[in-house]
Image (cartoon, rainbow, N blue to C red):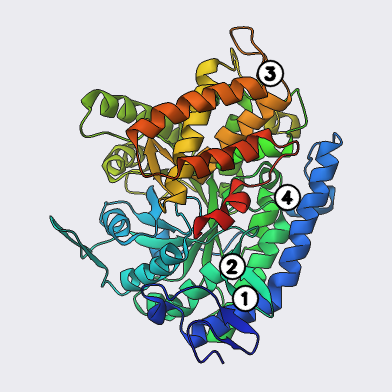
Amino acid sequence: MVTDPMNRSTTGVELLGSQPAHGIDVLTPDAIEFVAGLHRAFDQRRSELLAARVERQRRFDAGELPEFLSETAHIRDDPNWRVAPAPADLEDRRVEITGPVEPKMMINALNSGARVFMADFEDALSPTWENVVTGQWAVQEAVRRRLTFQTDEKSYALNPQIATLVIRPRGWHLNETHLHVDGSPVSASLFDFGLAFFHNAREQLDRGSGPYFYLPKLESHLEARLWNDVFVRAQAQLGIPRGSIRATVLVETILAAFEMDEILWELREHASGLNAGRWDYIFSLIKKFHTRDDMILPDRAQVTMAVPFMRAYQQLLVRTCHARGAHAIGGMSAFIPNRRQPDVTENALARVREDKQREAGDGSDGTWVAHPDLVAVAAEIFDRVLGDRPNQKDRQRPDVRASAPELLDTRVEGGQVTEAGVSTNISVALQYLASWLAGNGAAAINNLMEDAATAEISRSQLWQWRVHAVTLADGRRMSRELYAAIRDAELTRLGASARGFRWADAASLLDGLVMRDDFAEFLTLAAYPMLDG
């Protein structure tokens, strides 16, 4: 047993760093031992799966392209299997709101009128030790309806009726360096899941809900199988009925798009649905095929859900989910309203309406928004389509035939790389990284909600355009020199408008990602050591 919540190694378990606020409530000896048990049981498999990602990337670098797996064709071809029925409070998911696990934002999201709130430990959270532990405490308080927040001007508290809570832990590739087990840092996935499950699963069931999760950045059905085995062990260890957990998988990697049936199959007793995580999906395509000069994307603003590879993936997700009795959840439109600028708000509402109308028309059962003011906008569109029905899972899509070439069709009609696109990517990346290093993982930039996924697109495009010396619309070639000149101009402009940010650290981090010879798999892997320092 861990007998001291901080700074003592007992039975191979060691918590590092200073005692964070709420640590005594979250980092209890039994909870830490539970997480340590998950680590010991599953970290070897996690490491093997991460090594398999590296090996598969080598094959893509050599020119291979993904295909639907021949060895799992029997799963895709079997029309008879279904995932477990949805629990009552996950049956209607027409509008879901997302945000970091920060108390004030959680209260606003839970009170927003959305059916579901995804509380995010991943892309929308800057994972300082303080933020991660406070987030776990805030989840505990929200589950028990005790969460409050106080400012000098206002008190925040939960309404009697709130959204269904779903937790997104960090991805398999990340470690939580503040907890070591047998000399190694634990998986951030197991840390986030383990603490949330240990402290809240029984309470959630007693209150008529359950332990619900969003699973990020999976690249294969074998990674989904690992999650399912974690769920089985966790439920058995705490005496929680098997099948109580429900998981929605974010299809936000190009490889997961080729294994949607298989992912649902592996999680079928715990699966709730799939979500079209569009921003990470774009990043994933750039990352997996970064060596190819025939798959270079134009300015980020031109890569919409209407381009071929995005359209094929969205429609295949709906077809796959509905064939298996699962929810198909649409993705996030990054446009957000600005209450001080009516014209910006009008444009944001128009773009969000267009996006949600397409998703509802395709058969999606719900969608994501990033701001409480957008809940009613999205709800109006899905109310019109769904009426009194909780979803449209009965709408099958036999007309959808998304082949491998269609999923990889990166043509963008009229697409160009422009100086404005380069400047925007540099500006957004610098601003987001400076915000993230300062402890804020969800940043409103240029009237768009930016998180780690959109920052990944920005920095990966800059690397891709530089390495391939892409010709800009004005005839110039993208180069180290052009990048450096625009970066310096952006730093001068930004430094004058937001003093106190870690601009030098943000610029150093971005330079390292853009100027290196090889492609960095995730910016967070480079950024984590800079965070709590």
In the rendering, at what x and y percent does residue 368 appear? 42, 45
Image quarter of residue 338? top left
User: Badge 3 is on which residue?
Assistant: 470
Q: Are marks 1 and 2 in contact (CB under 8 Å)?
A: yes
Q: Is residue 98 above or below residue 342?
A: below
Give the image quarter of residue 161: bottom left
Q: Amino acid at mark 3?
A: Val
Identify residue for label 1.
Answer: 180
Q: Which residue is mark 2?
A: 177
Asked if the residue at tag 1 contacts the one at tag 3, i.e. Cβ–Cβ closer than 8 Å, the answer is: no
Query: Which one is in front in this view, the residue at disc 4 or the one at disc 2?
Result: 2
Is disc 4 surrounded by few (<14), some (14 to 19) or many (20+) residues within 10 Å?
some
Name the residue: 21% across, 65% down: 160
Which numbered circle lies on residue 76?
4
Q: Is residue 192 above or below residue 325?
A: below
Left or right: residue 225 versus residue 443 is right
Helix, strand or loop for disc 3: loop
Q: Residues within 10 Å of mark 3 (few under 14, many from 20)?
A: many
CA gap, disc 1 and disc 2 = 7 Å
The structure residue drawn at horizontal position 62% and vertical position 13%, both measured from the top left corner, is 472
Q: Amino acid at mark 2?
A: Thr
Question: In this rendering, which labeled residue sits more in front, label 2 or label 3?
Answer: 2
CA gap, disc 4 and disc 3: 39 Å
Relative image position of residue 229 (x, y in whole percent): 66, 72
Residue 478 is tagged as none
Most extreme residue toward the top is: 475
